[in-house]
Image (tube, rainbow, N blue to C red):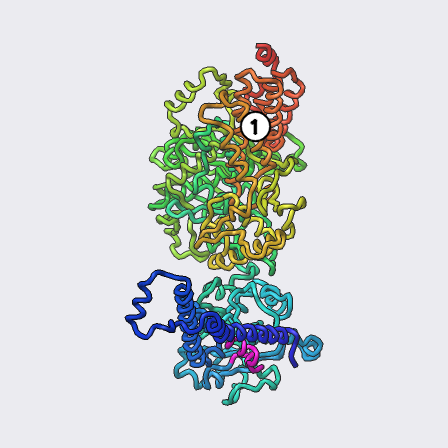
């Protein structure tokens, strides 16, 4: 029985063969007939020798001579064509067996010929290939086994995937079991026992029907659409019934046969096939030979040797193409290379401090187009991103996911907890040091471990902000300064005492406070009485770490305090020297701790967190900035004097920047703005929610795209010059080894969605140049690129005063694209820095206009336009103090005191939510002194 797809293929072959035969005969027979009738023989009638022929050529050119010459050229062209036809006929006859196996032999032969010699090959080859497709036996639907040895290795498969009744109802989609071949290369002497050793596998034979895709076939028959590269790898070299092969995984034709691997079962090997030729076409489908892999390839490996899908990708398709259930916990520590090791709990504190860091950077920074806002150190940014990944909600395994993310770090310990190291990939809490008699750290890694311990205490306090810390530390100033230089004497959870004696007295007071708390709790179990200062009803005074270097004068006092060390109350830790009765730990360079009293610990090895001095400075600078302070030893007086000289008229209140000093945003919200005219087939919006638009359509497209596709598009939009595959994998936190397969799936998803939305059939919306990925600049436009282009046009080098109207218009155009934060509503690990960067660009532009409007006499209409921009950004960034300052001054200049007061109250409300208050310069704007400024 011939199925409809096969009938269409044969009709196509008949038409191709007939057309090619007619063209060939027309060229071979028709061309000489036309030349004979038009000009006769090409040799002149009255020329009998070469001498006469030369004399004839020396005569003036006449029309009859020109006709004879043209006829001669025509006969020569026909003779050359006839020669190539004869030559190619001989070649195709000699290579007929190869053509029967692989029709692409014809394409490769034609491609190797020159232009003048390819016409005959094209005619003869097309005719031969068409005839082969017309008369090919039906047994060619399955590839033959290449050798008798492989026939002996033929292993029967398990039961068919589709029952017999189902196959009878749907003959065009029949599925039958096929066999698997053991790898022929390298078997050697193992062949004799291969029937009992070869791994059993299941394969089915599938006939492609109209509308099928490798993606859909893999999802239906393999249970996972991401396993489609395995089907492609098994069938890409298989010659189909029409002589074609799967050269493009996006193009499969109805009627083609595909071998599909299904889940392997731990079944005993089946009996080998008999040493006979493959079954005839009339044999049952279960006896058909499968389309095996290429030589040197195992039937289930999915390896390939060429094409768009590399062997590495196909081999990993089954291993990394599907999200696996997380059976193992992620890492509990974050390696920082040579900078040291930090725990995920401390990294969570850096993540909490990062928002305050951005806010204070904006408060201290002036909008200067020549300088960029300072950025987080790579060390802190890496730790914050890891904490971000660890604190995101765990998502269940999704078989439809297009990529495999890395296993995220373990969740951090509860808020307020301090950890000191890792043991068996689990963070060890600070109470490990609460040993009666204290604990002493010595060795080359003791200083780095102590530095990391203080950082852990400070970052734990950030997670408790604005509440009091659960764990505090006190250390003599010389000890704290050697570990974390630049900190003030009292900074959040760390207190620096003048000397060791003062630190001991503070520890004694802490013990007294604990004793009083216990007594009050015993006397007032309901907790209705007054609380002791520096305590909370829930936790009391908390835990105090006393860090000191013992000396002969204070050894006795430290020993007495260490004897009272216990969890939740007091911990005494000494460096470089051991107190009598203290637990001695030797710390190696990599943080490995060895107990001298018990070198072989039954609980397992402990590796302490540790940081280099530079890493400690990076962390403390972030923490200080998050509290609006500067490191004492990092800021020199010269730059401060220079900054003051630049603006001699600026007013400073209590050391804070004056109201005219502007800065950038932190966290935006979307504002409805009309969509600009679209000039390219696809427009991508990344300010606000990520949205796609197709030209000519008012509604968004691609709304059903998966979240990872939107993230991929936003990442490319943020880097218009392109990103390398390795950088994309790092930013998307892809699992090791899965990047190529994941990127391929992302590109395919974008291609399908945008082609369907635009009606395009061949365009690639993502350009792939080697390993470089970028959005096609001729097909995709973004609001981000329009925003950046308008800002470049806003401020000429000559200054705003000479081009005020142009600057105002350009900034209005730019902020029309700025509808909200970059990738609003997303939780991408890489997006925070980009979000802050573009927020800074937007607010800087508005603040520069506002400053110019305050210092120059501008028309009320232009002042209202600047106020509209400030209000637009104030809605997006309600906690941006510089925006509020300029808006208040402009409202007051316009006589709108109520609007100025409303702006101040809105700012104050949002800062209160952060545990902050407006700076004195902002508060002064709404006092009665502002009336004098307005009437000035």
Q: What residue is drawn where x is 51% and y is 89%?
A: 276
Query: What's the magenta region?
Result: 126-143
Q: What residue is drawn where x is 60% and y is 42%?
A: 678
Q: Main secondary structure of the magenta part?
A: helix
Q: Name the residue under label 1.
A: 809
Secondary structure category for the residue under label 1: helix
Q: Does the magenta stretch include residue 216?
A: no
Where 788 falls versus 681 (above or below)? Answer: above
View extreme (left): residue: 51
Where 313 falls versus 584 (above or below)? Answer: below
Q: Is 386 on the left-hand or right-hand side of 172?
A: left
Q: Examine the rendering and report whether any part of residue 571 can be seen.
A: yes
Q: Nearer the viewer, residue 849 or 349?
A: 849
Q: What residue is drawn where x is 44% and y is 78%?
A: 89
| Residue 93 image point, x, y percent | 45, 81
Q: Nearer the viewer, residue 302 or 89?
A: 89
Q: Is residue 142 magenta?
A: yes
| Residue 322 image point, x, y percent | 56, 61
Q: Examine the rendering and report whether any part of residue 104 can be seen.
A: no
Quadrant where the image shows the N terminus: bottom right
Where 217 falls versus 147 (above or below)? Answer: above
Q: Nearer the viewer, residue 131 or 270?
A: 131
Q: Which of 481 and 367 is in front in this view?
A: 367
């Amino acid at each position: 029985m011939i199925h409809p797809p096969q009938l269409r293929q044969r009709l196509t072959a008949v038409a191709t063969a007939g057309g090619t035969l007619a063209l060939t005969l027309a060229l071979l027979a028709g061309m000489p007939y036309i030349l004979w009738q038009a000009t006769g023989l090409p040799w002149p009638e009255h020329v009998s020798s070469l001498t006469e022929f030369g004399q004839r050529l020396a005569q003036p050119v006449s029309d009859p001579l020109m006709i004879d010459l043209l006829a001669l050229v025509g006969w020569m062209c026909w003779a050359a064509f006839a020669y190539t036809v004869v030559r190619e006929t001989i070649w195709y006859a000699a290579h007929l067996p190869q053509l029967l196996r692989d029709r692409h032999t014809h394409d490769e032969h034609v491609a190797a010929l020159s232009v003048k010699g390819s016409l005959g090959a094209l005619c003869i080859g097309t005719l031969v290939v068409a005839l082969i497709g017309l008369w090919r036996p039906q047994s060619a639907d399955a590839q033959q086994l290449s050798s008798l040895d492989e026939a002996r290795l033929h292993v029967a498969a398990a039961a068919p995937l589709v029952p017999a009744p189902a196959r009878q109802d749907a003959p065009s989609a029949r599925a039958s079991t096929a066999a698997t071949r053991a790898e022929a290369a390298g078997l050697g002497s193992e062949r004799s026992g291969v029937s009992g050793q070869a791994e059993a596998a299941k394969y089915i034979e599938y006939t492609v029907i109209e509308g099928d895709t490798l993606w859909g076939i893999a999802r239906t028959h393999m249970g996972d659409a991401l396993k489609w590269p395995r089907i492609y790898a098994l069938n890409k070299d298989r010659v189909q019934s029409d002589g074609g092969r799967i050269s493009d995984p996006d193009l499969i034709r109805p009627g083609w046969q595909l071998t599909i691997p299904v889940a392997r079962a731990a079944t005993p090997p089946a009996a080998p096939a008999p040493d006979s030729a493959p079954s005839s076409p009339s044999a049952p489908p279960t006896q058909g030979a499968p389309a095996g892999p290429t030589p040197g390839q195992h039937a289930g490996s999915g390896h390939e040797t060429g094409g768009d899908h590399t062997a590495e990708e196909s081999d990993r398709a089954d291993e990394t193409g599907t999200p696996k259930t997380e059976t193992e916990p992620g890492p509990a520590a974050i390696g920082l290379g040579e900078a040291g090791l930090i725990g995920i709990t401390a990294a969570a504190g850096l993540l909490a401090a990062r928002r305050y860091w951005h806010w204070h950077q904006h408060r201290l920074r002036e909008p200067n187009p020549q300088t960029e806002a300072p950025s987080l150190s790579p060390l802190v940014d890496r730790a914050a991103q890891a904490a971000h990944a660890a604190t995101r909600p765990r998502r269940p395994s999704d078989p439809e996911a297009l990529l495999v993310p890395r296993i995220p770090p373990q969740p951090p310990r509860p808020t307020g907890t301090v950890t000191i190291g890792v043991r068996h990939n689990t963070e060890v809490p600070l109470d490990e040091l609460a040993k009666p008699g204290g604990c002493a750290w010595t060795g080359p890694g003791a200083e780095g471990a102590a530095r990391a311990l203080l950082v852990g205490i400070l970052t734990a306090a950030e997670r408790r902000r604005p509440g009091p810390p659960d764990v505090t530390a006190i250390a003599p100033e010389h000890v704290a300064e050697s570990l974390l230089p630049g900190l003030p004497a009292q900074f959040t959870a760390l207190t620096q005492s003048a000397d060791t004696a003062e630190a001991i007295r503070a520890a004694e007071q802490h013990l007294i406070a604990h004793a009083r708390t216990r007594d009050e709790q015993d006397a007032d179990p309901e907790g209705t009485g007054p609380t002791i200062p520096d305590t909370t009803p829930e936790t009391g005074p908390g835990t105090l770490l006393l860090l000191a270097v013992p000396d002969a004068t204070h050894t006795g006092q430290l020993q007495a305090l260490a004897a009272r060390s216990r969890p939740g109350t007091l911990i005494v830790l000494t460096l470089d020297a051991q107190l009598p009765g203290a637990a001695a730990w030797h710390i190696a360079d990599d943080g490995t701790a060895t107990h001298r009293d018990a070198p072989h610990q039954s609980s397992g090895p402990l590796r302490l967190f540790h940081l280099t001095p530079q890493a400690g400075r990076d962390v403390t600078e972030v923490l200080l900035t998050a509290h609006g302070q500067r490191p004492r030893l990092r800021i020199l007086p010269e730059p401060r004097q220079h900054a003051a000289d630049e603006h001699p008229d600026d007013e400073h209140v209590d050391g804070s920047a004056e109201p005219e000093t502007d800065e950038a945003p932190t966290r935006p919200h979307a504002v409805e703005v009309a969509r600009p005219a679209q000039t390219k087939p696809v427009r991508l919006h990344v300010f606000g929610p990520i949205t796609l638009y197709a030209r000519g359509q008012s509604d968004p497209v691609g709304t059903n795209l998966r979240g990872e596709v939107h993230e991929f598009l936003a990442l490319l939009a943020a880097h218009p010059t392109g990103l390398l595959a390795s950088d994309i994998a790092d930013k998307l936190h892809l699992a090791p080894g899965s990047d190529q397969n994941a990127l391929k799936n992302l590109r395919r998803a974008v291609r399908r969605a945008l082609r369907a939305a635009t009606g395009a059939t061949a365009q690639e919306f993502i350009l792939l140049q080697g390993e470089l990925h970028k959005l096609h600049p001729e097909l995709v436009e973004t609001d981000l690129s329009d925003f950046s282009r308008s800002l470049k046009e806003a401020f000429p080098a000559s200054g705003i005063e000479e081009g005020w109207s142009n600057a105002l218009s350009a900034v209005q155009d730019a902020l029309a694209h700025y509808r909200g934060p970059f990738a609003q509503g997303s939780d991408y690990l890489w997006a925070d820095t980009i979000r802050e960067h573009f927020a800074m660009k937007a607010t800087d532009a508005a603040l520069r206009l506002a400053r110019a409007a305050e210092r120059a006499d501008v028309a009320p209409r232009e002042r209202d336009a600047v106020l509209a921009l400030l209000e637009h950004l104030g809605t997006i960034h309600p906690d941006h103090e510089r925006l509020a300052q300029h808006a208040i001054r402009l409202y007051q200049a316009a006589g709108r005191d109520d609007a100025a007061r409303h702006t101040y109250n809105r700012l104050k409300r949002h800062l209160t939510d952060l545990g902050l208050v407006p700076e004195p310069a902002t508060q002064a704007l709404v006092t009665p002194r502002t009336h004098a400024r307005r009437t000035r």
